[in-house]
Structures are given as C-alpha cells and as structure tokens.
Amino acid sequence: MTPKFDDSRDSKQQEARELDSLQRSRFEMLSAYLDGEVTADERYQVQQWLASDCQVKYQYRRLMKLRQGMQTLPVPQLEQSAIQIAQKVWVRLEQLRNRRIIGWSGAAIATLLIGALSSALPGGQSSVPQLAKISRPASHETLMVALNAPPVMIPKPMVASTDKFLQKSAVRSH
C-alpha cells in the first residue's frame, strides 16, 4: 500500500513542476510580447492565449500596470553634473598632495633644526660624524719603516718538543 501512495505523490509533484514550468514560460513569453521581442509565430501564440485563457489575461493586465507604473516614475535629477563632480575630485586630490608635500617638508626642516641645535649645545658630544683632518708636517720628512725589527713584539707560539715524540714512538715500535 505504501508504494502506491509514493507513486501518486511523485506524480502530483511532477504535475506541479510541469505546471510551474508552463506558467514561467508563459510569463516570459508575455513579458517578451510586451517588450516587442517576439517572432510573428510567438506573437500569434500569445494572442491566442489572451483570447482563450483567463490566467494569461490576468497576468497580462498586471504586467501592463507594472510597465505603466515604471514609465510614470519620476526620474531623480542630479544635483551636480558629472563634470562638476570630477572637478571636485581633482581639487580634493590636489589638496591631499599638497598636505603630503607640506608634511615631508616640515619633517625635513625639523630634522635640520634638531641637528643644528644639537651641534651648537655646549658640553655635549655631537652625534654628527666628524671628518679626520690630515695635518701636513712643516718639513718634508720621509717616512721610515723598520724592516729588521717589528714595531710590536709578537709572542712565539709554544711548540711541542719533537725529541720527546720521537723517543716515545721508538719505544713503542720495539
């Protein structure tokens, strides 16, 4: 008994889907008919539906009212033209650019002032790098390099005695 019930329910759902699909296709055809986007055969088909089907007539009237309502809606007027809006955008961009330039310029000036003040303060060491000065001797003395003796004594590395190593190796081999 359950299989028959399921079969009848499936067939009813299938019929509902087909009817829904039919209504959608008729609605799309009516909409295309109102927009003038149908062929001659389709126009004849819609006119046949309008003459014989009450539901199609009802949908047609509703679509006509909707179309007329859309056509009578007031179109909002722009407060400003596109050219005026574009000009305001360019002015705003120019203002942002000027602010950025002023900001970087101010930072550079502040850095220069801090550097100048820090070097002018007494008692403090300047953090500004100093260049070495080369002083030239008054007389033309020549530079002498001592090749025989190094200027700094370098200690000699400790070396293990090779004699003891040789004696140990000789004892082991005997």
Image (cartoon, grey):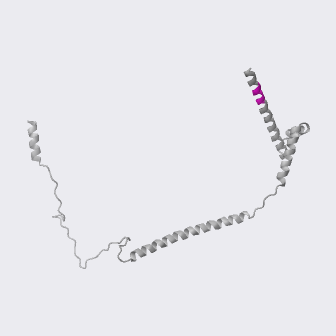
Q: Image point 86% across, 43% down: which residue?
A: 60
Q: Is residue 129 above or below residue 56?
A: below
* Residue closest to the far top: 1
What secondary structure is the stretch in magenta mostly built from?
helix
Q: Is residue 164 above or below residue 15?
A: below
Horizontal side, residue 50 vs residue 135: left or right? right
Horizontal side, residue 155 vs residue 60: left or right? left
Which residue occupies the foreground of this view, 127 or 139?
127
The quadrant of the image that shows the C terminus is top left
Q: Which residues are magenta?
A: 8-14
Q: Where's residue 41, x and y in %? A: 86, 38
Which residue occupies the foreground of this view, 57 or 166?
57
Q: Image point 85% across, 51% down: which residue?
A: 68
The quadrant of the image that shows the N terminus is top right
Q: Where's residue 111, x and y in %? A: 46, 71
The image quarter containing residue 95 is bottom right
The image quarter containing residue 132 is bottom left
